Amino acid sequence: MSKQEKAMTKDRLIGMEVIDSDGCTVGTVKDIAFTVGKMGMTLIVETKKGESKEVPWEEIQAAGDYVI
């Protein structure tokens, strides 16, 4: 892993704010899921309206103080 590539733990991701490509807040990470037999994972995000939304990890551009 290079210096810029850091592993993200579940505990660190949960509770992070998720921001879309337009800079608008989507919601907060509530859980992480994966499908048996498939690569990758999905973030379970609770929107401002209290609804659950699945965001595939492949769509995530960055994760640090926020998930983008």
Image (cartoon, rainbow, N blue to C red):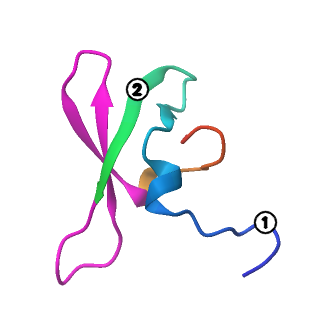
Looking at the rendered image, the quarter that the C terminus falls into is: top right
Position in image of residue 27 (x %, y %): 39, 27
> Mark number for residue 39?
none
Q: Tell which of 40 and 11 is nearer to you.
A: 11
Position in image of residue 20 (x %, y %): 49, 31
Q: Amino acid at mark 2?
A: Val
Residue found 30% across the figure and 50% down from its top: 31
Residue occupied by mark 1: 4
For mark 2, does the 10 Å Cα neighbourhood hold few (<14), some (14 to 19), or many (20 or more) residues? Answer: some
Position in image of residue 62 (x %, y %): 61, 50
The magenta stretch spans which residues? 33-57
Looking at the rendered image, the quarter that the N terminus falls into is: bottom right
Q: Is residue 20 left or right of residue 4?
A: left
Of pointers 1 and 2, the one earlier in the residue sequence: 1
Q: Where is 24 relative to 10, above or below?
A: above
Q: How many marks?
A: 2
Residue occupied by mark 2: 26
Q: Where is 33 relative to 25, above or below?
A: below
Q: Is residue 66 magenta?
A: no
